[in-house]
Image: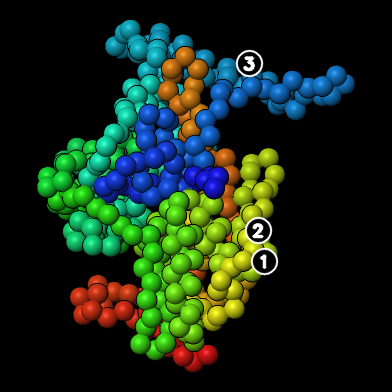
Amino acid sequence: MNIKPLQVITGCLVAMVLLAGTFSAGMLVGHTVIPSLSEPPPSEISISITTQPQEPIPSPGEESTAPTTPDLETLFEPFWEAWQIVHDEYVDQPLNDISLMRGAIRGMLEAIGDEHTSYMDPDEYIQANIPLEGEYEGIGAWVDPTGEYLTIISPMPGSPAEEAGLKPGDQVIAVDGEDMTGVDGYLVIRHVLGPAGTTVRLTIRREGVAEPLEFEVVRAKITIPSVEAHMLDENIAYVQLYQFGENVDQELRQALKDLLSQEPIGLILDLRNNGGGYLDSAIEVASEFISEGVILYEEFGDGKRETFTALQGGLATDIPMIVLVNEGSASASEIVAGAIQDHERGLLVGTTTFGKASVQNWIPLRNDQGAVRVTIARWLTPNEHIIQDVGLKPDVEVPYTDEDYDAGIDPQLDKAIEILLGQ
């Protein structure tokens, strides 16, 4: 199978392996492992690395589309004027011209206003590319490394991150007391990784909490299955996907065969705290429940659009179904849930999803001058709803509180069962 990795996404999502396992290049819709960093850090959907883009040469008789008003020389007059002023007037001379140049690149990319578009200087780029070999341990969380701070997408079930109390949306602002402001997310991951049994102290910014929170997390080796499936007492099939790995389609298909042979009255697909995986896997999973039509659109900055449609032969395209989602459902999970919702194949129950559906590429600069990460595309649902920064709103909103968790109850699952029994 030709796997097209998403970050994670990533984007997204990187599985911050902060988990154990051998890491391969790619994240997804972040592949769920930290990529092999013998190559540049991957994109949320693609780690296609290109050379420095060149201005297209117009054909004979064709007018150039390059901007001419104002021309570049005129446009950059204020920049060079400011450059000369600081070189003439600044009190501490000489200035470091290389640092000024790199700072200008950072400022230019920040001015775009997209937190996922950024610059890595050569030293940062080298650190991020140090190969990871063998097994690694960490805290067990899927993360988005492409924002202002490394952000927790979701803790893995039973992981140190979950046991410590980390939640989706938590931002890592310091590691072991070291401020992570301005540090690329891929480098922050390096700080969090470490041998099993050791402790890492994370300073967390959490929405709705005035002061930063401190968490001490004991690293561990972590293994997470892709699929868990069983029958509920109410004769309802239950399938939980933990990640969209390379083999999730095979595991899901076998699980569906086993469950459907027991003639359930309905099916619950649980995508809660699923931080993503491969784009191909997301399409394959969605195709098990949707017989035909669009699964998602990938839209590029030049207006071009790629359409991904359902594959034939899905096993569960007719059975009544409910999809459970929450704020930890991201990327590939949002693609699947969005397609099911738009096709009115099943209801979404839970809370609004994470909102990670943009595509980033790393482009190395010439002469080992670092690299630029640029958002090149976004994903849209079949009904052309934007997921990025918005998420998917469930058809039936049901919160799941800490008190519910401590009491051992699951109101979201209970509501899904109630709806299916009512049908």
Q: Position of residue 255 (x, y in %)?
A: 43, 69
- For disc 3, the marked residue is 73
Q: Residue at x 23, y 79 (%)?
A: 408
Name the residue nearer the viewer: 343 or 182: 343
Say the numbered circle drawn on residue 292: 1
- For disc 2, the marked residue is 309
List the single residue furthest toward the right: 61
Q: CA distance from mark 2 to mark 3?
A: 46 Å
Colouring used for the render? rainbow
In the rendered structure, which amino acid carries the disc numbered 2?
Thr
Q: Residue at x 59, y 74 (%)?
A: 317
Name the residue nearer the viewer: 380 or 295: 295
Name the residue nearer the viewer: 7 or 319: 319
Q: Position of residue 281 (x, y in %)?
A: 50, 55
> Who comes first in sequence, dot 2 or dot 3?
3
In the rendered structure, which amino acid carries the disc numbered 3?
Glu
Q: CA distance from mark 1 to mark 3?
A: 53 Å
Q: Nearer the viewer, mark 2 or mark 3?
A: 2
Asked if the residues shown at circle 2 and circle 3 are in contact, with their CB atoms under 8 angstroms apart, the answer is no
Q: Secondary structure at mark 3?
A: helix
Asked if the residues shown at circle 1 and circle 2 are in contact, with their CB atoms under 8 angstroms apart, the answer is yes
For residue 276, above or below residue 5: below
> Who comes first in sequence, dot 1 or dot 2?
1
Q: Residue at x 63, y 60 (%)?
A: 311
